[in-house]
Image (cartoon, helix red, strand yellow):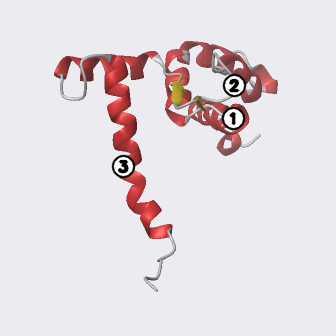
């Protein structure tokens, strides 16, 4: 096999990331965190792959995180949203709580961030709305 065609560890990580996102529905930020947290595992199975090569599909299956409730990362219903977040995102929320700018507790901070996120996309929604005539 030509050395140009031999996959590298970075190629392997990229394949696992792609499979986590497309095959398992993992949000990109969560996939990145999973790969970073389990990088020693990925290095080991890539190295142990031998002549057959390590399987990115097996690695993605091993790393895949399923949401605790239902099959979605965000669950909508009865006027509520339930999010599953990783440790790093939780740390960011906690840091925002300490600023006091977006709320006094994690729930208030997440609520403010979601509202700001929705507000940020409203201009796109307004562009796609048909113009009503005043007749």
**10 Å neighbourhood of mark 1: few (<14), some, or many (≥20)?**
many
Q: Which is nearer the N-term, disc 3 or disc 1? A: 1
Q: Nearest the camera: 84 or 49? A: 84
The reply to whether the C-beta atoms of the residues labelled 1 and 2 are less than 8 Å apart is yes
Q: Which is nearer the N-term, disc 1 or disc 2? A: 1
Residue in view at x 69 percent, y 25 percent: 60
Q: Nearer the viewer, mark 3 or mark 1?
A: 3
Q: Which residue is mark 3?
A: 119
* Circle on res. 96: none
Q: Residue furthest bottom?
A: 135
Q: Which quadrant of the structure image shows residue 126?
A: bottom left
* Circle on res. 60: 2
Distance from label 3 to label 1 (Cα)? 31 Å
Please, what secondary structure does the residue beneath circle 3 have? helix
Residue 54, position as x, y percentages in the image: 74, 24
Residue 32, position as x, y percentages in the image: 51, 29
Whether 34 is drawn above or below 134: the answer is above
Q: Which residue is mark 1?
A: 19
**10 Å neighbourhood of mark 3: few (<14), some, or many (≥20)?**
few
Distance from label 1 to label 2 (Cα)? 6 Å
Please, what secondary structure does the residue beneath circle 1 have? helix
Q: Is residue 16 left or right of residue 116?
A: right
Q: Which is nearer the N-term, disc 2 or disc 3? A: 2
**Quarter of the figure that contains the N terminus:** top right
Q: Which quadrant of the structure image shows residue 94?
A: top left
Distance from label 2 to label 3 (Cα)? 34 Å
């Amino acid at each position: 096999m030509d050395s140009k065609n031999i996959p590298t560890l970075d190629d392997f990580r990229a394949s696992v990331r792609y499979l986590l996102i497309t095959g398992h529905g993992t949000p990109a930020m969560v996939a990145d965190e999973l790969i970073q947290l389990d990088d020693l595992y990925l290095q080991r199975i890539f190295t142990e792959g031998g002549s057959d090569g390590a399987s990115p599909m097996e690695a993605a299956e091993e790393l895949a995180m399923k949401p605790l409730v239902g099959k979605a990362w965000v669950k909508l219903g009865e006027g509520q949203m339930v999010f599953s977040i990783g440790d790093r995102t939780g740390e960011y929320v906690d840091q925002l709580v300490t600023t006091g700018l977006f709320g006094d507790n994690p729930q208030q901070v997440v609520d403010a961030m979601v509202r700001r996120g929705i507000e940020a996309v409203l201009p796109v929604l307004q562009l796609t709305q048909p113009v009503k005539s005043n007749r």
